[in-house]
Amino acid sequence: MPLSPMNQRRLQLFKAHRRGWWSLWLFLGLFILSLGAELIANDKPLLVKYDGALYFPVFKRYPETVFGGEFPLQAHYKSPYIQELIAAKDGWMLWPPIPFSYDSINYDLQVPAPAPPSPANWLGTDDQGRDVLARVIYGFRVSVLFALTLTLISSLIGVFAGALQGFYGGWVDLLGQRFLEIWSGLPVLFLLIILASFVQPNFWWLLGIMLLFSWMSLVDVVRAEFLRGRNLEYVRAARALGMGNGQIMFRHILPNAMVSTMTFMPFILTGAIGTLTALDFLGFGLPAGSPSLGELVAQGKSNLQAPWLGISAFCVLALMLSLLVFIGEAARDAFDPRK
């Protein structure tokens, strides 16, 4: 479907912002790579050939009896016993570039954990002997997926609330604004910590807690656009033609309101990532053992003799947030009505 002249112009303006354009492609490339983290960093081989048959341990669990073992337990492919059984049948294993998952421990360390970078662990290990690079890759994916999900759901709620306030005005707008003033005045981070301390939060529970407050970021922007747009000529013409309020709101006014909304999306993403990192750093975020950049920062704080922990997490966070800010700047320029 061809783009309208207006959207073609916006795309040209976005491309003209070279830093934002290349940041978008770099961020998408890193995110796509992180989606295949199991193929990059895993303590299971990608492919096993045994007795003329092919097996894919990354996608399916096999008991060691499949490879001639004695017990119906999941095969441990780094075990010399399993390796000997596979080699006895002229078999072989194809390993991913990083032979560690985010939770696998390197028991062959030559020094106590946290171990410095080495050929086996390119960015070293954390204080439990887990590979830092594997945890960074998985942590990047968790952070981005969490932020994208939170941004999408909170934006839908915020746009809907702002549309109702701006379109109907009057008491709806007055009551909505008073509620927002009270709700936004609450100490969000302290409330998140209190709520997270009652239960053991997981990905979805933490997402629900943060959703209670994150939806307010777009309400004022959408409300202002609807307050301005509800009195324009094309809206009055739609009313004269007998269109319902729902059609006018979401078919005629909302597309124009989304122009300003789109420029805020990358900055909402950065806020969501920052909040998740802060909660993980304080110990109120994802469950212990989850691949988390905030938890890696906390380990760096507790192990100052291992600077690779804090530096690795800081560099990944700085790169991620910088790319999103550059993308947001390009989107802002592309949707600027003055251009």
Image (tube, rainbow, N blue to C red):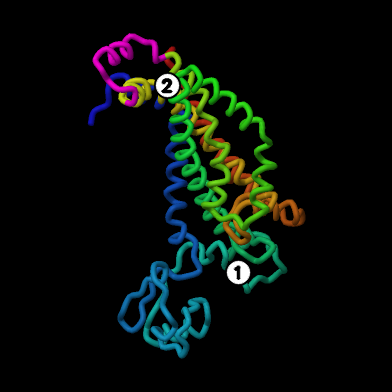
Residue at the image position 45 percent from the left and 64 percent from the top = 96
Q: Which residues are magenta?
A: 229-246
Q: In this picture, is 239 found above or below 51?
A: above
Q: Of all residues shown, which one is farthest toward the bottom?
A: 70
Q: Which residue is mark 2?
A: 335
Q: CA distance from mark 2 to mark 1?
A: 48 Å
Question: The residue tagged with tag 2: helix, strand or loop?
Answer: loop
Q: Which quadrant, please, contains the C terminus?
A: top left
Question: The residue tagged with tag 1: helix, strand or loop?
Answer: loop
Q: Position of residue 258 (x, y in %)?
A: 41, 25
**Quarter residue 135 falls in:** bottom right
Does the magenta segment cover residue 299?
A: no
Within 10 angstroms of label 1, few (less than 14), some, or many (20 or more) residues? some
Q: In this picture, is 49 found above or below 240?
A: below
Q: Position of residue 240 (x, y in %)?
A: 27, 12
Please report whichever mark, 2 or 1, sits nearer to the chain's N-terminal start.
1
Q: Residue 165 — which label?
A: none
Check if mark 2's residue and mark 1's residue have beta carbons within 8 Å. Answer: no
Residue type highlighted by circle 2: Phe
Residue type highlighted by circle 1: Ile
**Quarter residue 160 falls in:** top left
Q: Which one is closest to the eye, mark 2 or mark 1?
A: 2
Q: Which residue is mark 1?
A: 105
Q: Of all residues shown, which one is farthest toward the front?
A: 171
